[in-house]
Protein backbone atom coordinates (compact mmCIF):
# COMPACT_ATOMS: atom_id res chain seq x y z
CA UNK A 1 0.00 0.00 0.00
CA UNK A 2 1.73 3.16 -1.17
CA UNK A 3 0.75 6.74 -1.82
CA UNK A 4 2.31 9.93 -3.12
CA UNK A 5 2.63 12.41 -0.29
CA UNK A 6 5.00 14.87 -1.94
CA UNK A 7 2.35 17.55 -2.46
CA UNK A 8 0.76 17.11 0.99
CA UNK A 9 1.30 19.48 3.90
CA UNK A 10 1.78 17.93 7.33
CA UNK A 11 1.09 19.73 10.59
CA UNK A 12 2.51 18.48 13.89
CA UNK A 13 1.01 19.32 17.26
CA UNK A 14 3.70 18.35 19.72
CA UNK A 15 7.36 17.72 18.90
CA UNK A 16 8.56 15.59 21.81
CA UNK A 17 10.58 12.42 21.23
CA UNK A 18 7.97 10.77 19.04
CA UNK A 19 7.03 13.93 17.17
CA UNK A 20 10.65 14.75 16.44
CA UNK A 21 11.33 11.12 15.41
CA UNK A 22 8.50 11.37 12.88
CA UNK A 23 9.76 14.69 11.54
CA UNK A 24 13.23 13.18 11.18
CA UNK A 25 11.89 10.04 9.49
CA UNK A 26 9.68 11.96 7.08
CA UNK A 27 12.57 14.28 6.23
CA UNK A 28 15.08 11.46 5.65
CA UNK A 29 12.57 9.52 3.56
CA UNK A 30 11.77 12.71 1.61
CA UNK A 31 8.05 12.01 1.83
CA UNK A 32 7.35 15.73 1.67
CA UNK A 33 9.67 18.72 1.25
CA UNK A 34 10.61 20.40 4.56
CA UNK A 35 8.70 23.55 3.66
CA UNK A 36 5.52 21.42 3.72
CA UNK A 37 5.99 20.51 7.39
CA UNK A 38 4.48 22.78 10.05
CA UNK A 39 4.85 22.22 13.79
CA UNK A 40 3.75 23.67 17.10
CA UNK A 41 4.94 22.91 20.61
CA UNK A 42 4.64 24.42 24.08
CA UNK A 43 8.44 24.61 24.16
CA UNK A 44 8.93 27.16 21.38
CA UNK A 45 12.69 27.45 21.96
CA UNK A 46 13.11 23.72 21.29
CA UNK A 47 10.79 24.00 18.28
CA UNK A 48 13.01 26.68 16.81
CA UNK A 49 15.98 24.33 17.09
CA UNK A 50 14.01 21.72 15.11
CA UNK A 51 13.17 24.40 12.57
CA UNK A 52 16.87 25.11 12.09
CA UNK A 53 17.84 21.42 11.93
CA UNK A 54 15.12 20.13 9.59
CA UNK A 55 14.19 23.40 7.80
CA UNK A 56 10.52 23.01 8.79
CA UNK A 57 8.09 25.79 9.74
CA UNK A 58 7.77 26.56 13.45
CA UNK A 59 4.27 27.74 14.42
CA UNK A 60 3.53 29.81 17.50
CA UNK A 61 0.20 28.11 18.18
CA UNK A 62 -1.60 24.86 17.35
CA UNK A 63 -4.14 26.43 15.01
CA UNK A 64 -1.35 27.81 12.83
CA UNK A 65 -0.03 24.26 12.39
CA UNK A 66 -3.51 23.02 11.46
CA UNK A 67 -4.67 25.67 8.98
CA UNK A 68 -3.43 24.84 5.50
CA UNK A 69 -2.21 21.35 6.42
CA UNK A 70 -3.68 18.23 4.82
CA UNK A 71 -2.52 15.86 7.57
CA UNK A 72 -2.43 16.68 11.28
CA UNK A 73 -0.29 14.50 13.55
CA UNK A 74 -1.20 14.90 17.20
CA UNK A 75 1.77 13.92 19.34
CA UNK A 76 1.07 15.45 22.76
CA UNK A 77 0.58 13.86 26.17
CA UNK A 78 -2.79 12.10 26.56
CA UNK A 79 -3.93 14.30 29.45
CA UNK A 80 -3.89 17.48 27.35
CA UNK A 81 -5.72 16.01 24.34
CA UNK A 82 -9.15 17.46 25.35
CA UNK A 83 -7.67 20.95 25.62
CA UNK A 84 -5.90 20.64 22.26
CA UNK A 85 -9.01 19.35 20.48
CA UNK A 86 -11.08 22.21 21.87
CA UNK A 87 -8.48 24.68 20.63
CA UNK A 88 -8.25 23.34 17.06
CA UNK A 89 -11.88 22.29 16.53
CA UNK A 90 -12.87 25.34 14.48
CA UNK A 91 -9.75 24.99 12.31
CA UNK A 92 -10.55 21.42 11.28
CA UNK A 93 -12.12 21.14 7.83
CA UNK A 94 -11.24 18.04 5.80
CA UNK A 95 -7.81 17.26 7.24
CA UNK A 96 -6.77 13.74 8.20
CA UNK A 97 -6.10 13.51 11.94
CA UNK A 98 -3.43 11.02 13.00
CA UNK A 99 -3.13 10.49 16.75
CA UNK A 100 -0.15 8.86 18.46
CA UNK A 101 -1.35 9.75 21.97
CA UNK A 102 -1.21 6.53 24.01
CA UNK A 103 -4.51 5.27 25.36
CA UNK A 104 -6.72 7.93 23.75
CA UNK A 105 -9.49 6.24 21.79
CA UNK A 106 -10.64 7.26 18.33
CA UNK A 107 -14.09 8.15 19.67
CA UNK A 108 -12.52 10.87 21.81
CA UNK A 109 -11.44 12.67 18.62
CA UNK A 110 -14.62 11.94 16.69
CA UNK A 111 -16.79 13.27 19.53
CA UNK A 112 -14.72 16.44 20.03
CA UNK A 113 -14.11 17.39 16.39
CA UNK A 114 -16.57 18.25 13.58
CA UNK A 115 -18.82 15.40 12.45
CA UNK A 116 -17.19 13.26 9.74
CA UNK A 117 -13.61 14.15 10.72
CA UNK A 118 -11.20 11.51 9.41
CA UNK A 119 -9.23 10.00 12.30
CA UNK A 120 -6.52 7.35 12.36
CA UNK A 121 -4.98 6.13 15.61
CA UNK A 122 -1.39 4.88 15.61
CA UNK A 123 0.64 3.16 18.32
CA UNK A 124 4.35 3.45 17.45
CA UNK A 125 7.19 2.67 19.84
CA UNK A 126 10.38 4.37 21.01
CA UNK A 127 12.43 2.75 18.22
CA UNK A 128 10.98 5.49 16.01
CA UNK A 129 13.98 7.52 17.18
CA UNK A 130 16.24 5.20 15.12
CA UNK A 131 13.65 4.64 12.33
CA UNK A 132 12.93 1.05 13.39
CA UNK A 133 9.54 1.48 15.06
CA UNK A 134 6.83 -1.13 15.13
CA UNK A 135 3.58 0.80 14.56
CA UNK A 136 -0.02 -0.41 14.65
CA UNK A 137 -2.60 1.63 12.72
CA UNK A 138 -6.36 1.70 13.38
CA UNK A 139 -8.87 3.62 11.22
CA UNK A 140 -11.76 5.67 12.57
CA UNK A 141 -15.29 5.44 11.20
CA UNK A 142 -14.75 8.14 8.56
CA UNK A 143 -11.24 7.10 7.49
CA UNK A 144 -10.97 5.77 3.93
CA UNK A 145 -8.51 3.34 2.32
CA UNK A 146 -6.61 6.36 1.02
CA UNK A 147 -6.34 7.72 4.56
CA UNK A 148 -4.94 4.39 5.74
CA UNK A 149 -2.52 4.45 2.82
CA UNK A 150 -1.31 7.90 3.88
CA UNK A 151 -0.86 6.86 7.52
CA UNK A 152 0.98 3.72 6.45
CA UNK A 153 3.35 5.69 4.22
CA UNK A 154 4.12 8.14 7.04
CA UNK A 155 4.88 5.46 9.61
CA UNK A 156 6.74 3.20 7.19
CA UNK A 157 9.22 6.09 7.08
CA UNK A 158 10.20 5.24 10.68
CA UNK A 159 9.90 1.44 10.65
CA UNK A 160 7.27 -1.19 9.91
CA UNK A 161 3.50 -1.03 10.21
CA UNK A 162 0.48 -3.26 10.66
CA UNK A 163 -3.21 -2.36 10.34
CA UNK A 164 -5.39 -3.64 13.18
CA UNK A 165 -8.82 -2.97 14.69
CA UNK A 166 -8.69 -0.57 17.61
CA UNK A 167 -9.73 -3.15 20.20
CA UNK A 168 -6.30 -4.79 19.76
CA UNK A 169 -4.39 -1.61 20.64
CA UNK A 170 -3.96 -2.72 24.28
CA UNK A 171 -2.29 -5.92 23.06
CA UNK A 172 -0.05 -3.81 20.81
CA UNK A 173 0.85 -1.62 23.79
CA UNK A 174 1.81 -4.66 25.88
CA UNK A 175 3.88 -6.20 23.09
CA UNK A 176 5.56 -3.62 20.87
CA UNK A 177 4.80 -0.48 22.88
CA UNK A 178 6.45 -1.74 26.06
CA UNK A 179 8.57 -4.35 24.27
CA UNK A 180 11.74 -2.28 23.77
CA UNK A 181 12.16 -2.12 27.57
CA UNK A 182 11.99 -5.91 27.76
CA UNK A 183 14.64 -6.22 25.06
CA UNK A 184 16.88 -3.62 26.75
CA UNK A 185 16.78 -5.77 29.87
CA UNK A 186 17.64 -8.89 27.86
CA UNK A 187 20.57 -7.12 26.16
CA UNK A 188 21.80 -5.93 29.56
CA UNK A 189 21.54 -9.46 30.96
CA UNK A 190 23.36 -10.99 27.99
CA UNK A 191 26.12 -8.40 28.35
CA UNK A 192 26.35 -9.13 32.09
CA UNK A 193 26.90 -12.79 31.25
CA UNK A 194 29.67 -11.83 28.87
CA UNK A 195 31.30 -9.61 31.51
CA UNK A 196 31.07 -12.48 34.01
CA UNK A 197 33.07 -14.61 31.58
CA UNK A 198 35.77 -11.98 31.06
CA UNK A 199 34.60 -9.65 28.28
CA UNK A 200 34.91 -5.91 28.86
CA UNK A 201 31.58 -4.09 29.25
CA UNK A 202 31.74 -2.21 25.95
CA UNK A 203 32.50 -5.32 23.91
CA UNK A 204 29.87 -7.38 25.72
CA UNK A 205 27.20 -4.74 25.09
CA UNK A 206 28.07 -4.48 21.40
CA UNK A 207 27.98 -8.26 20.93
CA UNK A 208 24.69 -8.58 22.82
CA UNK A 209 22.98 -5.74 20.94
CA UNK A 210 24.21 -6.89 17.52
CA UNK A 211 23.11 -10.44 18.33
CA UNK A 212 19.57 -9.25 19.09
CA UNK A 213 19.55 -7.06 15.98
CA UNK A 214 20.75 -9.91 13.76
CA UNK A 215 18.29 -12.41 15.21
CA UNK A 216 15.41 -9.97 14.72
CA UNK A 217 16.45 -9.35 11.12
CA UNK A 218 16.49 -13.10 10.45
CA UNK A 219 12.94 -13.43 11.83
CA UNK A 220 11.72 -10.59 9.61
CA UNK A 221 13.54 -11.57 6.43
CA UNK A 222 14.10 -15.34 6.48
CA UNK A 223 10.45 -16.36 6.61
CA UNK A 224 11.10 -19.47 8.70
CA UNK A 225 9.26 -20.18 11.94
CA UNK A 226 11.17 -19.00 15.02
CA UNK A 227 11.47 -22.61 16.24
CA UNK A 228 13.18 -23.54 12.96
CA UNK A 229 15.58 -20.62 13.31
CA UNK A 230 16.32 -21.70 16.87
CA UNK A 231 17.07 -25.23 15.67
CA UNK A 232 19.55 -23.81 13.14
CA UNK A 233 21.70 -22.65 16.06
CA UNK A 234 21.11 -25.65 18.30
CA UNK A 235 23.38 -28.59 17.49
CA UNK A 236 23.11 -31.91 19.39
CA UNK A 237 25.05 -31.84 22.65
CA UNK A 238 26.34 -28.36 21.91
CA UNK A 239 26.60 -25.09 23.81
CA UNK A 240 23.28 -23.59 22.74
CA UNK A 241 21.08 -26.44 23.97
CA UNK A 242 22.72 -26.17 27.38
CA UNK A 243 21.87 -22.48 27.48
CA UNK A 244 18.31 -23.07 26.28
CA UNK A 245 17.76 -25.69 28.96
CA UNK A 246 18.68 -23.13 31.62
CA UNK A 247 16.30 -20.57 30.08
CA UNK A 248 13.44 -23.07 30.10
CA UNK A 249 14.37 -24.11 33.65
CA UNK A 250 14.22 -20.49 34.85
CA UNK A 251 10.93 -19.76 33.10
CA UNK A 252 12.20 -17.13 30.67
CA UNK A 253 9.54 -17.98 28.07
CA UNK A 254 6.60 -17.68 30.49
CA UNK A 255 8.11 -14.56 32.08
CA UNK A 256 8.15 -12.82 28.68
CA UNK A 257 4.59 -13.89 27.93
CA UNK A 258 3.42 -12.68 31.34
CA UNK A 259 5.18 -9.33 30.85
CA UNK A 260 3.21 -8.71 27.64
CA UNK A 261 -0.06 -9.83 29.25
CA UNK A 262 0.46 -7.70 32.37
CA UNK A 263 1.35 -4.60 30.34
CA UNK A 264 -1.73 -5.19 28.19
CA UNK A 265 -3.93 -5.36 31.28
CA UNK A 266 -2.44 -2.12 32.58
CA UNK A 267 -3.10 -0.46 29.22
CA UNK A 268 -6.77 -1.48 29.52
CA UNK A 269 -6.92 0.02 33.04
CA UNK A 270 -5.44 3.31 31.85
CA UNK A 271 -7.82 3.37 28.88
CA UNK A 272 -10.81 3.24 31.22
CA UNK A 273 -9.51 6.31 33.04
CA UNK A 274 -8.97 8.39 29.90
Image (spheres, rainbow, N blue to C red):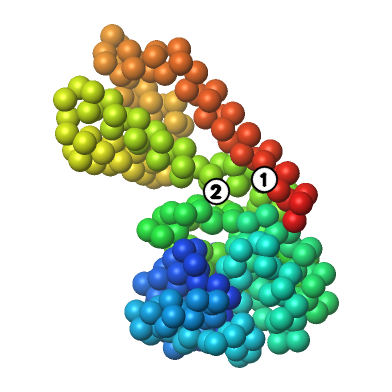
Quadrant holding the C terminus: bottom right
Q: Which quadrant would the N terminus be assigned to in this image?
A: bottom right
In which quadrant of the rendered view does residue 23 lie?
bottom left
Q: Position of residue 69 (x, y in %)?
A: 59, 85
What residue is disc 2 on?
177
Q: Determine whether 212 is above or below 55 in the image.
A: above
Residue 148 percent location from the top left of the image:
63, 66
Tag count: 2
Disc sitting over residue 267 in the figure? 1
Q: Position of residue 64 (x, y in %)?
A: 60, 89
The secondary element bearing badge 2 is classed as helix
Give me the residue at 40% from left, 71% from top.
Answer: 24
Residue 190 location, x and y as percent?
32, 30
Reply above or below: 249 against 58: above
Q: Does the rendering let one see residue 5?
A: no
**Cβ–Cβ under 8 Å for marks 1 and 2:** yes
Amino acid sequence: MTTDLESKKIGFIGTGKMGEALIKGISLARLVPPENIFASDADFAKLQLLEQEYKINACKDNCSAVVGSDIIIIAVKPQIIPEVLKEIKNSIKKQLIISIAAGVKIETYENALPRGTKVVRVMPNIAATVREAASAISPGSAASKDDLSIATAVFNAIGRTVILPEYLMDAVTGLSGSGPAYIFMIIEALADGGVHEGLDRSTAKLLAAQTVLGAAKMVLEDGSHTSELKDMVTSPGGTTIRGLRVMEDRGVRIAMMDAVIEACERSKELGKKS
